[in-house]
Image (spheres, helix red, strand yellow):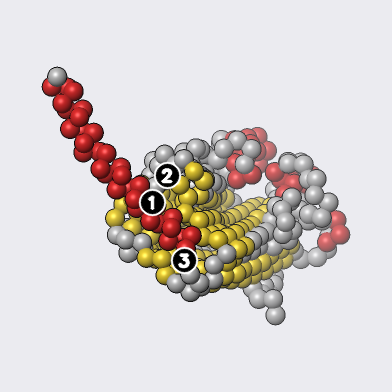
């Protein structure tokens, strides 16, 4: 009898709280659906458990505003409907600011086909930390233009904490990404600037990729500067089959099969496998079925960065670990900058990679095109400079 009474009192305490949370959810969903153009959706201070996505569609000039990154918390643990926490589609001039989204089933905040999207002082996180069952992306604008992500944080994404895909005119600044597979990723996107960010304790700190089989075929014209990219040595916890699952533990910055990228004035510290890697898609050994895809990096300029790493071996885990162990054999003298040496026959003789004026930098062309037979640590052939623009003018 005593136990039954205890259960009843417990239920009496929980049920009103549940109904209160459901009321909050209904109210928030109504605010998103009924928002007028050029209005502000004000989210109250507090921690709220929601079981369905909040979706804003076809709106212009709407601001979604909380009371502060750590004051308005939307938690989707146990989500039943939708995959994202917040989803914004087919809009223009949308701002999301001063709130946190936690523990979504899929991506934390996804925006798609939005012309003018700002994330400001927004945190996306999975509170249990790194786990392959976490959602793929934290902050996830895709097929957007005029993207600004500033003073944001991302933690625990099983793909990328801050990901911008198939978009153009992008700024990512003053953000922090930690404990993701990829901290910050710019993929198949044009005219991006990534600066004054901290990427730490991810598998890979900052990735600039062009991949096949996407609507936007070719990115590029990207600048990555003034970032602190350090200790990105987290175990890769991407779900099986995901392309970032091939990023080796201990990667600082990786440039894959894209063009016109400038990496400068960054502090790239203690990433055990590579500080900066410039590689072709062929190094992934994935088949290419997209006939319009160009798998080589070109016009890449790495300069004025500060490199440091502990005198230790690169990762010995995964496919790259085997490569380091059996083919490259760098021991503890791992080069800071690695180029896979796979070049388009049509560009032979052209300077596609320049490296100049970096502090403490060492280098290797690993000659992957010839089964690693002629690995060269001579940096002088790459002492040149390139002009990279991040505007379409």
The numbered mark, 3 or 1, whose residue comes first in the sequence reads 1
Q: Earlier in the sequence, mark 2 or mark 3?
A: 3
Residue at far left of view: 2
Is disc 3 placed on a helix, strand or loop? loop
Q: Secondary structure at mark 1?
A: helix
Q: Nearer the viewer, residue 136 or 364?
A: 136
Quarter of the image where the N terminus is located: top left
Task: Tell me, yes or no, whether the two marked residues, 2 and 1, touch with CB atoms within 8 Å.
Answer: yes
Of mark 2 and mark 1, the one earlier in the sequence is: 1
* CA neighbours of label 1 inside 10 A, class few (<14), some (14 to 19), many (20+): many
Q: Residue at 38% across / 51% down in the picture?
A: 25
In this figure, which residue is indicated by the disc labeled 2? 51
Marks 2 and 3, Cα distance to the nearest angstrom? 21 Å
Relative depth, front residue between 79 and 18: 18
> Could you tell me how far apart the alpha carbons at marks 3 and 1 are, in whole angstroms?
15 Å
| Residue closest to the eye, 279 or 165 | 165
Examine the rendered structure and indicate whether residue 129 appears above or below residue 376: above
Residue placed at 45% from the left, 47% from the top?
52
Place of residue 217 in the rendered image (x, y in percent of width and height, measured from the top left): 74, 58
Q: Which class describes the residues within 10 Å of circle 3: few (<14), some (14-19), or many (20+)?
A: some
Can residue 382 be seen from the camera position used here? no
- The x and y percentages for residue 190 are 66, 66
Residue 5 found in image quarter: top left
Q: Which residue is mark 3?
A: 35
Q: Which mark is residue 338?
A: none
Q: Residue at 51% across / 60% down in the picture?
A: 56
Q: On the image, numbered disc 1 is attached to which residue?
A: 25
Q: Residue furthest right?
A: 346
Q: Is residue 70 placed above or below 91 in the rendered structure?
A: above
Name the secondary structure under disc 2.
Answer: loop
């Amino acid at each position: 009898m005593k136990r039954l009474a205890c259960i009843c009192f417990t239920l009496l305490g929980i049920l009103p709280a549940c109904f209160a949370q459901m009321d909050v959810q209904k109210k928030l969903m109504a605010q998103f659906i009924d928002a007028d153009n050029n209005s502000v959706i004000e989210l109250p201070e507090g921690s709220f458990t929601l079981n369905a996505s909040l979706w804003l569609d076809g709106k212009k000039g709407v601001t979604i505003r909380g009371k502060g990154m750590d004051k308005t918390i939307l938690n989707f643990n146990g989500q039943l409907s939708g995959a994202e926490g917040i989803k914004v589609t087919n809009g223009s001039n949308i701002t999301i600011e001063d709130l946190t989204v936690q523990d979504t089933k899929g991506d934390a905040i996804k925006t798609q086909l939005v012309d003018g999207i700002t994330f400001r002082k927004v945190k996306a996180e999975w509170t249990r930390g790194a786990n392959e069952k976490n959602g793929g992306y934290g902050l996830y604008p895709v097929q957007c233009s005029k993207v600004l992500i500033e003073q944001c944080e991302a933690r625990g994404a099983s793909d990328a904490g801050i990901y911008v895909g198939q978009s153009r005119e992008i700024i990512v600044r003053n953000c922090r990404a930690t404990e993701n597979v990829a901290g910050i990723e710019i993929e198949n996107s044009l005219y991006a600037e990534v600066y004054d960010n901290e990427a730490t304790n991810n598998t890979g700190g900052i990735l600039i990729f062009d991949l096949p089989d996407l609507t936007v075929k070719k990115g590029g014209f990207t600048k990555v500067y003034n970032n602190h990219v350090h200790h990105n040595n987290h175990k890769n916890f991407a779900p099986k089959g995901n392309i970032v699952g091939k990023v080796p533990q201990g990667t600082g910055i990786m440039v894959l099969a894209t063009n016109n990228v400038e990496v400068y004035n960054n502090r790239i510290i203690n990433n055990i496998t590579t500080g900066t890697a410039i590689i072709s898609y062929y190094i992934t050994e994935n088949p290419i079925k997209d006939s319009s895809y160009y798998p080589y990096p070109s016009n890449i300029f790495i300069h004025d960065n500060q490199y440091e790493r502990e005198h230790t071996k690169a990762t010995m885990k995964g496919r790259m670990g085997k490569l380091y162990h059996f083919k490259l054999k760098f021991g503890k003298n791992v080069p800071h900058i690695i180029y896979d040496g796979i070049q388009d026959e049509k560009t032979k003789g052209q300077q596609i990679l320049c490296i100049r004026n970096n502090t403490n930098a060492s280098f290797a062309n690993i000659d992957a095109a010839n089964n690693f037979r002629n690995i060269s640590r001579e940096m002088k052939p790459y002492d040149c400079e390139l002009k990279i623009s991040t505007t379409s003018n």
